[in-house]
Amino acid sequence: PFVVRRSKIHGRGVFATRRIRAGRSLIAYEGQVLTEKQVDARYDHEDDADDPHTLLFHVARDRYIDASVGGNDARFINHSCDPNCESDVVDGAVVIRAIRNIQPGAELTYDYALEIEANPPKRRRALYACRCGARRCRGTMLDQ
């Protein structure tokens, strides 16, 4: 019920090709399953420290899904402060589900509510600026 194409929010996005009813599960977030140690080895390099565009999803205490390896179209769903979808973590898997009716042509979005270290420098917080365009945009993809 969706297609990936260029987005006004960021890069590529996922758009409804037909009406989607609230409550419908749309797609599982797929990718390589990693432990925290493996995530640290992959992303804790100085070059990666300032890149907010990782495709990691924390699904359990020591389990992450990295959609940059083996990911599917779910990795292109953009953030919005006024989303029409949500991500549900169930038994170590992530499912994207519509939280309201979505009309054909609408971009699918969910609130990333990202978490980073406590009291990050202003420059680091700025990397997570939100450009969703929602009327009540909070200005960040970070969890507040």
Image: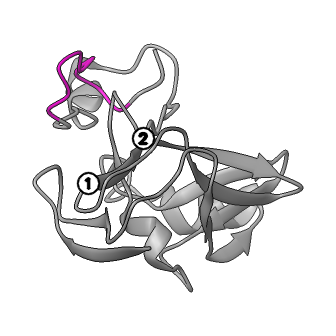
Asked whether, in this view, residue 34 is left or right of residue 75, the answer is right
Q: Amino acid at mark 2?
A: Asn
Asked whether, in this view, residue 2 is left or right of residue 135, the answer is right
Check residue 138 for magenta coloring: yes
Tell me the element at label 1.
loop
Vertical order, 87 against 64 (above or below): above
Residue 93 has which mark? none
**Mark closest to the chain's N terminus, 2 or 1:** 2
How far across and how far down the image is residue 30, in percent? 62, 74
* Residue that sits furthest to the right in the current view: 91
Asked whether, in this view, residue 26 is left or right of residue 83, the answer is right
Judging by the rendered image, the residue that carries numbered circle 2 is 84
* The N terminus - image quarter: bottom left
Q: Residue at x 47, y 76 (%)?
A: 68
Q: Quadrant of residue 16?
A: bottom left
Q: Quadrant of residue 28?
A: bottom right
Magenta portion: prevailing SS class: loop
C-alpha span from label 2 to label 1: 9 Å
Q: Are marks 2 and 1 in contact (CB under 8 Å)?
A: yes
Q: Residue at x 59, y 51 (%)?
A: 97
Q: Amino acid at mark 1?
A: Ala
Specify few, some or many for label 1: CA neighbours under 10 Å numbering under 14, 14-19, or 20 or more.
Answer: some
* Residue that sits furthest to the left in the current view: 8
Q: Residue at x 33, y 28 (%)?
A: 81
Q: Which residues are magenta?
A: 133-141
